[in-house]
Amino acid sequence: QVQLVESGGELVQTGGSLRLSCAATRSIFSFNRMGWYRQAPGKQRELVATIVAGGSTNYADSVKGRFTISRDYAKDTINLQMNSLKPEDTAVYYCNVRDWTNTEYWGQGTQVTVSS
């Protein structure tokens, strides 16, 4: 079993930056894929960014060039640096990991609100 705890979400103005962090209760070496998803009110959950064990990353078109996903093996965290934030980035952001048995785990989410 894995627990994921997100942090870093808050209210920020348009153009601002935030750094989200997801702390895992297990070594992130045990995951072959790690990522961030978001869900805005009235919308489906959508992929924001992923990073796989080999280091390749994937981003939603809407965040390319603005968001950067990274991992810290020493701290067992998955991070999302978000720059040039827009009101449309407002959502609950969820951390997601998949281990080598293809079992997926989700965090409880952290609220990001971007004011216009």
Image: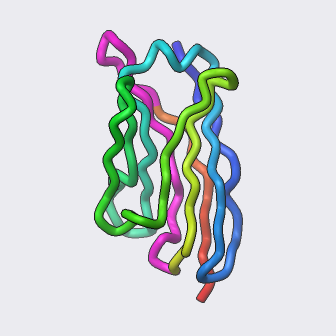
- Taking 52 as reference, is 81 above or below it? below
Q: Where residue 29 sits: x, y (%)?
A: 49, 15
| Residue 59 rendering spot, x and y as whole percentages | 34, 53
> Do we see residue 13 in this rendering?
yes
Q: Is residue 89 magenta?
A: yes
Which residue is nearer to you in this view: 29 or 5? Answer: 29
Q: Position of residue 75 (x, y in %)?
A: 69, 25
Which of these two is toward me, 72 or 39?
Answer: 72
Q: What is the span of residues highlighted in magenta in the rendered image?
A: 87-105
Give me the residue at 35% from left, 42% from top: 57
Q: Is residue 5 left or right of residue 86?
A: right
For image coordinates 60% across by 23% down, the residue present is 73
Q: Specify the color scheme.
A: rainbow
Which quadrant of the structure image shows residue 83? Answer: bottom right
Q: Quadrant of residue 105?
A: top left
Residue at screen point 44% across, 68% down:
41
Where 59 sits versus 89, above or below? above
Q: The C terminus is located in which quarter? A: bottom right
Camera-nearest residue between 100 and 51: 51
Does residue 24 appear in the picture of this structure? no
- Residue for point 37% across, 21% down: 32
Number of on-image labels: 0
Q: Is residue 77 left or right of residue 53?
A: right
Residue 35 horizontal/vertical position (percent): 42, 40
Q: Is residue 115 above or below residue 73?
A: below
Q: Can residue 9 be found in the magenta stretch?
A: no
